[in-house]
């Protein structure tokens, strides 16, 4: 292995990071909740448009520093799309071939974005097949399987180093409620919830971490039962979050609460929040917002005040053919008019 090539590769990634400003923390004004402040950490402003930009950078640095990647290594990843987009970006930055293994149901916009960064797409019939196919492809090509679902929780330095938790709490320092009472996130790999949960404990903060979980995901049931063998043959329709199996990077022991969220709630909240912000958001952000509103209602009923922070995971522009297509929503999600009416009457 060329140590100099590795050093140069790390320097390129660090320089790329240095050129990028931190993502914004947006305050969401909902007059109904007096004394309860709600914030969105807008991860869609990363160069590759999503929260997964942080993960991809960490995964590449982790692999480079552990001697897994050389100048001739083919990078393979199992993904629902967003991580693959970000990894394709970093692979191109380093001049490496990148192949994303994804389900055929992945949105066309995401596939096109991967290709725009010179990545290749290897499509399989369903989400549960991406793991084995990635491992096999890595063997055939003598490549490196990045394996975000195993390495996400260990690739990020949760003590600091400008991870997402450190960024959130730094940006909150001048707010009325400077230490959030709650942080709400959804889980795909589990890396983000692991980073935030560990950071909260390491810094002895009173903040509670709540993970919201969509339909057909096993994380909520795992949290309740501790059975890590759970499987679900159905696929989460909320891209980027929810998994058919318990991923190694999902660390339930650092999560304080979990809330299951129906798909109809997620899409209705996504569309409602898009109108509120004047900016399209993805369905995972809608899922997050459902959790935020439920927690805010509970706080209000108990006479509590404080701040709730959640993530705007990615832009809704990636989902024009799915979540923002009424015909697609009607076919795959169902009638969401009742959920939409509830949001408008209760929170607008």
Image (spheres, rainbow, N blue to C red):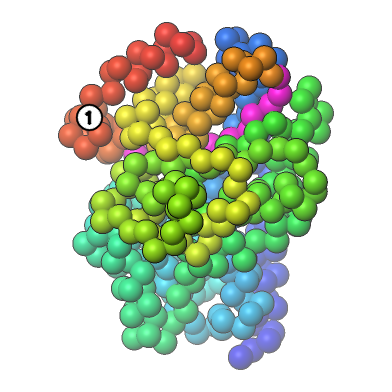
The answer to which of 196 and 8 lies nearer the viewer is: 196
In the rendered image, is residue 295 in sight?
yes
Please provide the residue range marked out in magenta.
Answer: 305-319
Q: Is residue 271 magenta?
A: no
Inspect the magenta stretch and tell me whether residue 307 lies in it: yes
The reply to whether residue 44 is in sight is no
Question: Toward which corner of the image does residue 93 lie, by quadrant?
Answer: bottom right
> In the image, what residue occupies the spot 44% across and 46% down?
220
Q: Percent position (x, y) of residue 238?
A: 36, 42
The picture places residue 292, in percent across and down from the top left corner, at 54, 28
The residue under label 1 is 334
Residue drawn at point x = 36 percent, y = 69 percent: 131
Q: Give the residue drawn at x 25%, y 34%.
A: 333
Dot 1 lies on which element? loop
Where's residue 83, x and y in %? Answer: 47, 57
Q: How many marks?
A: 1
Q: Nearer the viewer, residue 329 or 183?
A: 183
The residue depicted at 37 percent of the width and 49 percent of the height is 217
Which quarter of the rendered picture does the N terminus lie within? bottom right
Residue 60's place in the image compared with 166, above or below, is below
Task: Give the x, y percent position of residue 85.
Answer: 44, 57
């Amino acid at each position: 292995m060329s140590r100099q090539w590795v050093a140069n590769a790390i320097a390129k990634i660090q320089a790329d990071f240095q050129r990028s400003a931190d993502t914004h923390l947006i305050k969401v004004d909902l007059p109904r909740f007096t004394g309860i402040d709600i914030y969105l950490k807008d991860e869609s402003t990363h160069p590759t448009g999503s929260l997964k930009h942080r993960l991809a950078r960490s995964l590449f640095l982790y692999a480079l520093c552990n001697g897994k990647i050389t100048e001739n290594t083919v990078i393979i990843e199992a993904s629902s799309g967003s991580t693959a987009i970000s990894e394709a970006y970093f692979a191109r930055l380093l001049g490496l071939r990148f192949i994303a293994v994804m389900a055929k149901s992945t949105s066309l916009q995401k596939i096109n974005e991967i290709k725009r960064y010179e990545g290749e797409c290897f499509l399989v019939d369903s989400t549960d097949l991406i793991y084995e196919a990635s491992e096999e492809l890595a063997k055939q090509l003598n490549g490196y399987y990045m394996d975000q679902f195993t390495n996400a929780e260990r690739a990020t330095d949760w003590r600091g180093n400008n991870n997402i938790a450190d960024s959130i709490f730094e940006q909150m320092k001048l707010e009325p409620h400077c230490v959030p009472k709650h942080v709400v996130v959804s889980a795909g790999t589990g890396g983000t919830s692991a980073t935030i949960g560990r950071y909260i404990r390491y810094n002895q903060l009173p903040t509670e971490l709540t993970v919201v979980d969509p339909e057909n995901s096993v994380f909520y049931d795992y949290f309740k039962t501790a059975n890590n063998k759970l499987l679900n043959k159905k696929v989460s329709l909320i891209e980027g979050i929810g998994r058919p199996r318990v991923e190694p990077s999902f660390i339930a022991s650092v999560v304080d609460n979990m809330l299951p969220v129906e798909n109809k709630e997620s899409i209705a909240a996504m569309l409602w929040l898009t109108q509120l912000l004047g900016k399209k958001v993805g369905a995972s952000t809608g899922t997050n917002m459902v959790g935020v509103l439920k927690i805010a209602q509970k706080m209000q009923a108990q006479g509590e005040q404080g701040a709730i922070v959640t993530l705007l995971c990615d832009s809704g522009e990636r989902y024009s053919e799915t979540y923002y297509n009424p015909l697609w929503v009607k076919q795959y999600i169902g009638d969401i008019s009742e959920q939409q009416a509830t949001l408008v009457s209760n929170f607008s």
